[in-house]
Image (spheres, grey):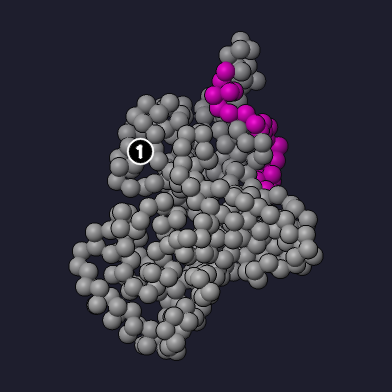
Amino acid sequence: MRYNYLIVGAGLFGAVFAHEMKQKGKTCLVIDRRKHIAGNIYTEEVEGIQVHRYGAHIFHTSDRNIWEYVSRFAEFNHYVNSPIAVYGKELYNLPFNMNTFSRLWGIRTPAEAKAVIDRQIAEAGIGEPHNLEEQAISLVGRDVYEKLIKGYTEKQWGRDCRELPAFIIKRLPLRFTYDNNYFNDPYQGIPKGGYTAIVQKLLDGIPVRTGVSYRGLLAQNGENGGGDSFDKVLYTGMIDEYFDYCYGALEYRSLRFETELLPDCKNYQGNAVVNYTERNVPYTRIIEHKHFEFGTQPSTVITREYPCEWKKGDEPYYPMNDEKNNALFARYRALADQQDHVLFGGRLGQYRYYDMDKVIAEALRMAGQE
């Protein structure tokens, strides 16, 4: 069969693009090398609990149009992201706010908190920061850095903070209010029934083949002496992989998830997201999935999240957007611009970290130009 578009990747970007093309009367075939749709926002029901299989995803946006768009495909609850940080036997609220500062220093007022932070920044005497450690201390002082940034960041990136470039942290928001809401965005929540249902609705009426890679489909079509054909391709996989790593491999950080059903535990940690900020704790956070939807099930499901080095064949999660990798991506981007029948989208195709609202916005922008 001939299609207007082959869409490689059944994640959020590919699904939004496919939906919009179908609305324009175009024919699409969507493939994904995983055995399921929805990409990294895939949720799976376990004991009545929607489990985020690839890490926590909290939808948030300041764009009313994007909120109204995604709300066409799901009803959202009023979940507000308020993570907890564990450092040894100490508990702190995130983001850094007056609850955090009160626990750290036994103070009560914004003026007291500002005075402590300003004094620590002055005592550090850092002029031009040369690495991430110096950048963080120059922004928030040594106490917040040592307890809540250093270990978590080193686990996340797999390097000592003094070996990481300063530009990774452009700012560290300090809130001098007793407000534990992690995001400032006015629209926030979790879709009732999980994210997979959103992607199912986006892809309604569009043929989807899972467990099929782009190279595999091309090979299969060749073996069949014809097979399916396409006017254009939207590729949401790794851009360097598409070009057979001709300039070398872009770098990523990967994640390993350890998910556990606790059948005899109703409430494991009392919060959906708990970060572990010490370097010697191997995971960065524990997710307790039922709390995203205020679950009352008699059991619970938790996931420990372990950052790890990425190598070819692993799942890439976070692009390493340092100078070296951005320069390499620019070379691949130049190659991509020469492809008049191939579009590159999403965090892997465009080598940037996207929040979900930005994924939708970029997919809508691209679809609007087709």
Considering every residue shown, the one lying at the far left of the view is 127
| Quarter of the figure with the N terminus | top right
Q: Which of 69 and 345 is in front in this view?
A: 345
Indicate whether 221 appears above or below 107: above
* Residue beneath the point at 62% across and 51% down: 258
Pinpoint residue 108: horizontal percent, then vertical percent: 45, 89
* Residue beneath the point at 55% across and 27% down: 214
Considering every residue shown, the one lying at the far top of the view is 225
Considering every residue shown, the one lying at the far front of the view is 280
* Residue beneath the point at 21% across and 73% down: 125
- Please state the extent of the stretch shown in magenta in the rendering: 196-219
Q: Which of 59 and 182 is in front in this view?
A: 182
* 26 part of magenta stretch: no
Indicate whether 105 appears above or below 30: below
Indicate whether 98 appears above or below 356: below
Note whether residue 13 is visible: yes
Q: Quadrant of residue 75?
A: bottom right
Indicate whether 6 appears above or below 155: above
Pinpoint residue 131: horizontal percent, then vertical percent: 28, 58
- Amino acid at the residue labelled 1: Phe
Note whether residue 187 is visible: no
Pinpoint residue 117: horizontal percent, then vertical percent: 33, 79
Q: In which quarter of the image is residue 127?
A: bottom left
Pinpoint residue 176: horizontal percent, then vertical percent: 42, 80
Q: Is mark 1 on a helix, strand or loop?
A: helix
Q: Is residue 192 left or right of residue 180?
A: right
* Residue beneath the point at 60% across and 33% down: 33
Question: Counting other residues with Cα less than 10 Å from the Cα at mark 1, is it few (<14), some (14-19), or many (20 or more)?
Answer: many
* 205 part of magenta stretch: yes
- State how many labels appear: 1
Q: Name the residue under label 1.
A: 329
